[in-house]
Amino acid sequence: MRIKTGSSCVSLLLAGAFVTAGHAAQDPAQATPVAAANHTTRLILLGTAAGPIPRALRSQPANLLIVDGRPYLIDAGNGVARQLVMAGFEPADVRYIFITHHHIDHNADLGALISFDWAEDYQRNAASAPPVQIYGPPSTTFLVQAALDYLSVAERIFSAGMPIFPAKGRFQAHDIDHDGLVYTDDRVRVTATENTHFHKPSSSPTYGKDRSYSYRFDTPDRSVVFTGDTGPSEAVTKLAEGADVLVTEIEDIETMMKTFTGKMTKPQADAFRAHLELEHLTPEAVGKMAAAAHVKSVVLTHFTPDEDVPTDASSFTKGIRKYYDGPVIAGRDLFEY
């Protein structure tokens, strides 16, 4: 499923999810790395379910941005390797990975992806392939090393029966500890902004230890922002200024409260509502952010709650339309934009 971008209006009926249209946004984004002529940027939603509960027909959060043929992976939820193959890629094709935050619905298959990449490089006889670069909040380095420790058992067993090259040195982790430019190459500039998903009081014992980031990818012909999980955030709104595409999480608070608070005490239910309001985005919050940032289009993912086969996305889109009149697309797994 593909949508051609570039016109000021878009209208589409996609797999039961209504896509509404409006006028394109205003000012251009920040400077892109090179001129836009003869370049292509593709976005594939690999997994669109909120987690960490596995779903029958939706995978956990993951997105693939392909810039002039080079894939960049944003998040690695459960099922990401299979979704990559379904989208026409192999795990070893992905040499650049960005994790928004370390909740397990966003990083659970990072270790599996590392293992499959190592195995595929061996099958390709790609001993000289450049290391896979993995970026994420603090503890990314720890998690990558833990994944390599896990892989070392299989590596030992394989090496007893066949010549292999070691996994050590083939994966380089980078802990992001600041806002601003975190990665650049000849095809993308990646800017990170800490968001409000980990909304903890300063008295919390883990205050400041764990961080959640939103990322902006500026490519030669497009600018794409991934909110990851966040609550309302002026910093994320600023990051998204003028972006061509805002890929954002979305939640329906009232349905969540009805679904999950039946056996909770009132203090537990109150804390749960506060978490939903402060650390996630309602349709109204998405609409306000998209309008304030003058983004050209919105793509919804990480649906909360998620039904395996939703036929009506209006509970998510109608709140956005109160504030934002640009294209709003309710994403599905393997949807390409």
Image (cartoon, rainbow, N blue to C red):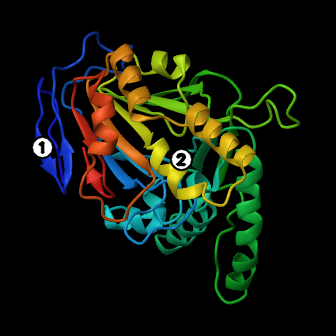
Residue 49 place in picture, x, y as percent: 44, 56
In the image, is 178 to the left or to the right of 124?
Answer: right
User: Could you say which disc has been placed on residue 12 in the image?
Assistant: 1
Q: Are marks 2 and 1 in contact (CB under 8 Å)?
A: no
Figure check: 63 above or below 311:
above
Alpha carbon distance from label 2 to label 1: 31 Å
265 relative to 67, above or below = below
> What type is the residue that disc 2 sits on?
Ile
Q: Earlier in the sequence, mark 2 or mark 1?
A: 1
Which of 291/124 is in front? 291
Q: Camera-side residue: 37 or 307? A: 307
Residue at 60 percent of width and 35 percent of height: 279
Q: Quadrant of the N terminus?
A: bottom left
Q: Position of residue 317 (x, y in %)?
A: 29, 38
Residue 128 shown left or right of residue 287 in the figure? right
- Classify 10 Å Cα crowding around label 2: few (below 14), some (14-19), many (20 and above): many
Q: Secondary structure at mark 1?
A: strand
Determine the secondary structure under disc 2.
strand
In the rendered image, the residue lying farthest to the top is: 27
Q: Nearer the viewer, mark 2 or mark 1?
A: 1
Q: Is residue 326 visible?
A: yes
Q: Quadrant of residue 90?
A: bottom left
Q: Residue placed at 81% from the left, 31% from the top? A: 207
Estimate the x, y position of residue 66 in percent, counting from the top left.
34, 44
Q: Which residue is mark 2?
A: 97
- x and y percent of residue 46 in the render? 38, 56
Left or right of 84: which side holds 17? left
Task: Locate the C terminus and report the quarter of the image it occupies.
Answer: top left
Identify which residue is drawn at 63% across, 63% down.
111
Which mark identifies residue 23? none
Identify which residue is drawn at 37% across, 68% down: 57
